[in-house]
Image (cartoon, rainbow, N blue to C red):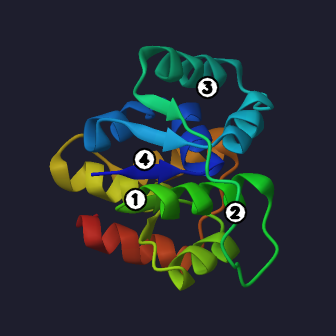
Amino acid sequence: MRAVSNTSPISNLAIIGRLGLLKQRYGRLLIPPAVVEELAHLSHPAAKARIQSAIAEGWIIVESPPVSLPRLPVQLDAGETEAITLALAVGADILLMDEKRGREAARQNGIPVAGVLGELLHAKQRGWISSLRDEIKRLRAEAGFFVDSKIEAFILAQAGE
């Protein structure tokens, strides 16, 4: 499965010590240079080290998107734009992105999307984590990740929690 990621799924999973879930699920993950740049500004030392280690190990792969950009319905930041462009160029099966506007733009370009919560739900369903509720609490507390209460209730119901 070809997977491309934007900054948020990688940084948030790295902060809570769950970056390895992406390796376990996808084997390798492509990211564009703009995402590398955004990840370099992460202020969480342990998360930054986990990400650098994944790049050094070769399962997070930096790949430049083509120069021509897709027609996007909204203005996005460089990481989101390059991630969508790279996903289109490589024919990605999935784009990992949490930002609502970026997800909408990706879908309008025919790219399936998933985010941190979907990845954690998948991990729970596979038995890779014991409690989705605990991981969401950690996302909030350690990464400052916002989770809408309706989305949280839906995801937890999907996980049987």
Q: Quadrant of residue 67?
A: bottom right
SS type, badge 1: loop
Q: CA distance from mark 3 to mark 1?
A: 25 Å
Q: Amino acid under label 1?
A: Ala
Which of disc 4 and disc 3 is earlier in sequence? 3
Which of disc 1 and disc 2 is earlier in sequence? 2
Residue under numbered circle 1: 92
Mark 2 or 3: in front is 2
Which of disc 2 and disc 4 is earlier in sequence? 2
Which of disc 1 and disc 3 is earlier in sequence? 3
Q: Residue at x 34, y 51 (%)?
A: 2
Residue under numbered circle 3: 47
**Which quadrant does the C terminus fall into?**
bottom left
SS type, badge 4: helix
Tag on residue 68?
2
Q: Amino acid under label 4?
A: Asp
SS type, badge 2: loop
Left or right: 124, with 4 as reference point: left
